[in-house]
Structures are given as C-alpha cells and as structure tokens.
Image (spheres, coloured by chain):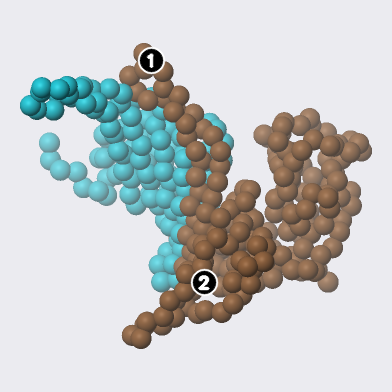
Chain colours: A brown, B cyan
Amino acid sequence: MSAKSGVVGAVYKQSSTTDTFTGEDATLQADNKTLIIDDLTLAGFVRDASLFTVYLDGSEVTAPYEIHFDRIIFNEEQETGTWTIDGTYAELETVGGAYEWGVDLKHAVQDATSFGDTWEQKLKGLLGWTASAKRHWIDDDYISIAEAGLPIILRLFTDSDTYDSYIGYGQIDGIKNGDKIDGITDGEISFSGSGSLIWSTVTPVEIA
Amino acid sequence: MAANSGIDGKAVLSAATIAKVTEWSLDMKHAVQDQTGFTETWESKLKGLLGASGSIKAVFDYADTNGQTALHTAFLTTASIALKLYYSTTGYYNIAAAFIDGMKPANKVDGKVEIEFSFVVSGAVTIA
C-alpha cells in the first residue's frame, strides 16, 4: 500500500434495520479470547448481549464477554474447538461526514520499578481510545444522538478506494460549533470509545 | 563529529525497518531529587532513576506488515518490542524493551493520512 492522500471519513450510527443469524462459524484468535465471525458480511453486531448466544462444540458458553463490531471478546481465555454464534447485526447509517479526523489510542503503562533498578521498569495495563472529527456545517444530527445518550459506531476511513478503516463503538462526549463573520461555520465532535477500536476492511452491511 | 542530516534516520522494529517514517524522538530523563535542607543557601540535588519515552511519526501504511502493522499489534498486546532509532546511517539508540502506549492516526482532507506511535521504555537505552 502506498501513502494515502487525505480522504473522507464518516461517522455512522446503528440503524433500526437489523437481521439475525444462527449457527454462524467463528474463529478463536491466537489470544484465546477474541472470537471473530467468519462471514464478515454479518459484521455490525448490535451491542446487546441478550441478543447473542455463543457455542463451543455445540454447547452454550456462559463465560462473560463483550460484544464488538465483528467479534466477541471473552474476559478469560477459552478452549479451542468449533465455535458458532447466534446473534443480531444492524445496517449502519451515516450520521455525517468530516474534513478531518483524529484518533488517540492509549495503552496504559504502569511503573514496575523496584529497589536495585537503575532504569525504570514498566508494565502494560488497560486499553482505551478517544477520537474527534471536524466539519464545516452545523445541524442537530449529533446533538440528538448526544442528548439521547445513544452509542454510535465510529468508522474512520484511511482510503477512498477501499473500506480500510478504524471502527469502534463510542459515545459523543463533546460538540463544539462556531461561526465567524470572516469565516465559515465550523464544528468539532469528540467521541469517547467504549470497547475496542479495530482495524477493518469490511464492506458496509446492507440488509435487504 | 559533523552534524547528521535527518534523511539518514530510520526506525527499526526488531530487524524490520518501519516504512514511511518521517520523524522519531527519544526523551531520556534522569530524575533529580531535591535534598535541600534548612539553612542552605543554594538548592542541593541528588540523582535517581533513569527513564525514557519517545514517539515515531510516519505516513500511514497498514500494509507494512513487519513495521507499522506490527506496531499496531504490539499496541494491542502486553508484549514489549525492541527498537533501534538511527540518527545516521550506522549510529543508533538501542532500546531492548519498550511498550507502545499510544497511537494517533489522523487524516486531513488537504493533507495525507499520518500516524504517530508513542512508546515508553522499560529498562536501559544504549547508544551504538
């Protein structure tokens, strides 16, 4: 892949257009915690655990997990075997475009230095992310989502020719709008991530 | 020694040169504690722990499997990475263990997609 010129990004929310799937194959990743659905056309999981059931070799798995865009992440390591998922996915609906976006991902690093050390020693902890997007117009689309406290799916593209993008669930935690007599309207929306921000090349879902 | 041109720089993750790097920085600190007591006229200091952190900026390239993509992966895991930050064609800072603790991808319609990785060093930094 060559370098990419600045291209559009977009912010989506989950629409009310949903569909269900049953017995879909999924693959447990090398960390033994992340379970990704094989058929990525079913990505866009509705973030409601009551709508999902996970099976290992035909038996329901009750271990706690979190739902993400195209995957389930267990709190603890799981055994390998034949994994399947029953669940619900939703079509994504564009909320608004942007002319600039940025993401700030952080992996907390704790200090683990002890007596006798010359250099500081470190250890990794929790992951988290925030993001923001800027645009040149103002309307109430984000405001109504923020007021309702609705989760959004943020999809930030790095390419206009493919679906290469960062995707994650988040909440709108800030809206800044402004206007200047010698400028144009300008707005900035900030997002606070909830769960993972994943790299995805998945084509947006269209439910017939 | 003559000054080094920036164009000779590079950042190496394990044995792979990270693609499209435009800038790196390393911030090394040696903590200095104050040990000034009453009646002293001038502050008195004492040295403590050494530590380091830094960042690597690049033009975004997720297809750089052993470089940028590996840094993404390292960010998500708790594993440490080894870095060499070259300031000339042969000279470099050697970091045996560091943690990627931040990633900042960004995109501007009139710019290009860029990414900045930040890291915290665990243990010593040496110069070669």
User: Considering the image in quadrants, where does the C terminus of chain A appear?
Assistant: bottom right
Give residue A28's position: percent from left, percent from top: 75, 38
Residue A182 relative to residue A140: left or right: left
Q: Quadrant of residue A18 in the image? A: bottom right
**Left or right: A53, with A141 as reference point:** right
Question: Where does the image place residue A73, in percent across and percent down from the top left?
Answer: 71, 42
Have a look at marks 1 and 2 and say if they share a chain.
Answer: yes
Outermost residue toward the front in this view? B38
Residue found 38% across the figure and 15% down from its top? A115
Q: Residue at x 56, y 55 (%)?
A: A192
User: Callout 2: few (<14), some (14-19), or many (20+) C-alpha neighbours within 10 Å?
Assistant: many
Question: Quick one: label 1, few (<14), some, or many (20+) residues within 10 Å?
Answer: few
Mark 2 secondary-structure assignment: loop
What's the distance in space between the residues labelled 1 and 2, CA to CA? 50 Å
Q: Given the image, what chain letter belongs to the residue carrying mark 1?
A: A
Asked if residue A169 shows in the view, the reply is: yes
Disc 2: which residue? A98
Q: Is residue A120 above or below residue A148?
A: above
Given the image, on which type of amino acid does mark 1 rest? Phe
Q: Which residue is mark 1?
A: A115
Q: Which mark is residue B78?
A: none
Residue A67 position in % (x across, y down): 73, 48
Q: Nearer the viewer, mark 1 or mark 2?
A: 1
Element type where label 1 sits in the image: loop
| Residue that lies at the very extreme toward the right in this rendered image | A58
> Residue B38's spot in the image, x, y percent?
15, 22
| Residue shown at the point (74%, 41%) measured from the top left | A65
Amino acid tagged 2: Ala
Q: Nearer the viewer, residue B123 or B112?
A: B123
